[in-house]
Image (cartoon, rainbow, N blue to C red):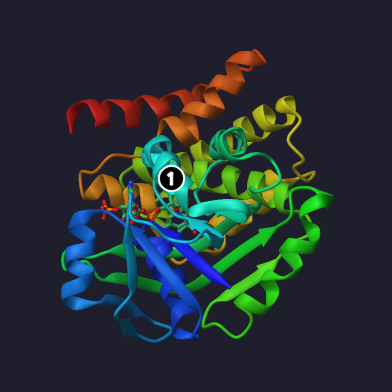
Amino acid sequence: MKVLVVGAGAVGGYFGARLAEKGEDVTFLVREKRAHLLNEQGLQVKSIHGDYQHRAKIVLAGEKREPFDLILLSVKAYHLKNVMEELAPFAGNQTLIMPLLNGFAHLEMLQERFSEDRVIGGLCFIESTVDQNGAIVQTSPIHELVYGALNSEQAEAVEKLEALFAGSNAEIRKSDRILADMWHKYMFISGLSGVTTLFRSPIGPIRENEFGISVTQKLFYEIGSIMRAEGAPIADGIENIQLGKIHNMTHGMKSSMQRDMEKLTEVEADHLQGYLLKLAEKHKIEAQVLSMVYANLKIYEKNR
Ligand SMILES: NC(=O)C1=CN([C@@H]2O[C@H](COP(=O)(O)OP(=O)(O)OC[C@H]3O[C@@H](n4cnc5c(N)ncnc54)[C@H](OP(=O)(O)O)[C@@H]3O)[C@@H](O)[C@H]2O)C=CC1
Ligand SMILES: CC(C)(CO)C(=O)C(=O)O
């Protein structure tokens, strides 16, 4: 099976390398600067699950290739519009596109551009980043990728992916309720990235402070109300389940949005919290904490 990973960054670089390490046929769609680096020093993964370095196969936008069987999409949401056009020539009628982005709004954009048959569900849990030398650094135990069919027509094609992922050095599993999983992850990451960027702190000190934890709880409850009003298939009590995870995370756990803020790069504020606020407005739900989180991010964007 031929796999194209779009974006050799923290997420795509990690999972793509794990598949290549297993011997799968993996190519990375990258931009000039990244291509130069990968050609010079290869794709380097430094991970608590084992380092791996290889001469990754790469392709640039506009180059000719046969369509791929699977496209793993792992760019930031603010690059998505542009990337969809660049990856289109690599996608044939049978190509499955699996987005690993945080959030939800990208799903509709992809379905509109590539049709509902081709876009399957996906998400990941991993704490990874790209260091100053371009290496992928993965620091905490979790390296999980979850995928699944979004409709019954995709089920057979999605089944076939199990052999691709089996035996790789990452926890990769198929889910029969990927849509709910994606909303749940969306809730979790909007809450976690929201408070860690608001307080500019890893999660430990936030949850130890009575006001910090109270703001965190209010944020999760607001997000839950918005998602329910939108008819998202979220589980009863999911807010408390996600808050439980917040309590169980390592003291120093940061969100990727927080790490982006520390690097003074763009953040996915519109894609995550901004999209939720639009839904809140649509359903006339008051979301004071979410508004504050979003304001903090937009002010950061303006000042950076
Ligand atoms: N990092 C993490 O821990 C986690 C991140 N996520 C989510 O995963 C998604 C990806 O994040 P992450 O991997 O951290 O982001 P990164 O910025 O590390 O990687 C994104 C990559 O996309 C590349 N890219 C952008 N535009 C193009 C293009 N036109 N053609 C080819 N490549 C392109 C960038 O390339 P270039 O080097 O040229 O800029 C970059 O290498 C986000 O939605 C994020 O929220 C989810 C779970 C955990
Ligand atoms: C919380 C985490 C690390 C889990 O994957 C994440 O998704 C992110 O920070 O973007």
Q: Residue at x 53, y 77 (%)?
A: 170
Q: Quadrant of the C terminus?
A: top left
Residue 163 shown left or right of residue 40 in the figure:
right
Q: Which residue is identified by label 1?
A: 193
Closest to the observer, 154 or 66: 66
Residue 270 in the image: above or below residue 6: above
Residue 140 position, x and y percent, is: 43, 72
Residue 190 shown left or right of residue 292 in the figure:
right
Q: Quadrant of the N terminus?
A: bottom right
Residue 9 seen from this side: no
Residue 96 seen from this side: yes
Q: Residue at x 59, y 39 (%)?
A: 220
Q: Residue furthest right?
A: 152
Q: Secondary structure at mark 1?
A: helix
Residue 106 position, x and y percent, is: 53, 38
Residue 283 position, x and y percent, is: 67, 16
- Would you say the beta carbon of the disc 1 residue lies within 8 angstroms of ligand 2? yes
Q: Amino acid at mark 1?
A: Ser
Residue 110 position, x and y percent, is: 56, 39
Q: Residue at x 64, y 81 (%)?
A: 166
